[in-house]
Image (spheres, rainbow, N blue to C red):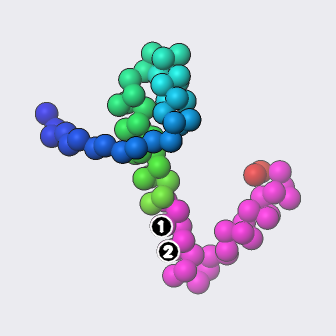
């Protein structure tokens, strides 16, 4: 069994209320929702960091803004 560590933080009242409501309506545990959200956010942040690094170092890459602009014209974004 993996070791677990306690993690405490203060949340704005509206966010705490939203978390309580979602968990109550969907029958989820707060621990599960918070852990999943943190894991997904960390993954997103690392993906953004990796993309920015590749763009900075790559010579054949176009800026993300240029790609988004092209996709928007094609209706893909």
Of 29 and 75, which appears nearest the observer?
A: 29
Q: How many marks?
A: 2
Q: Quadrant of residue 32?
A: top left
Q: Residues within 10 Å of mark 2 (few under 14, many from 20)?
A: few
Tell me whether circle 2 and circle 1 mark residues in contact (CB < 8 Å): yes
At x 38%, y 23%, the residue is: 29
Q: In this view, does 65 lie to the left or right of 28?
A: right
Using residue 64 as the reference point, say whether residue 41 is left or right of it: left
Q: Quadrant of residue 52?
A: bottom right
In the rendering, which numbered label is found on residue 50? 1
Most frequent secondary structure within the magenta stretch: helix
Residue at (40% x, 44% y) in the render: 10
| Residue extent of the magenta highlight | 47-75
Q: Mark 2 points at which residue?
A: 53
In the rendered image, residue 57 lying in the magenta stretch gets the answer: yes
- For the residue pair 67 and 17, the one nearer the viewer reads as 17
Residue 5 vertical placement versus 26 (above, below): below
Residue drawn at (20%, 43%), measured in percent from left and top? Answer: 5
Looking at the image, is 12 positioned above or below residue 66? Answer: above
Residue 31: x, y in percent? Answer: 35, 31
Q: Is mark 2 on a helix, strand or loop?
A: helix
Instruction: State the residue in front, 7 or 3.
Output: 7
């Amino acid at each position: 069994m993996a070791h677990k560590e306690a993690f405490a933080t203060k949340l704005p009242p509206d966010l705490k209320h939203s978390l309580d409501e979602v968990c109550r309506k969907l029958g989820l545990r707060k621990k599960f929702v918070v852990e999943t959200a943190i894991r997904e956010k960390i993954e997103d942040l690392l993906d953004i960091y990796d993309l920015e690094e590749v763009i900075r170092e790559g010579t054949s890459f176009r800026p993300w803004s240029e790609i988004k602009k092209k996709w928007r014209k094609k209706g893909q974004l």
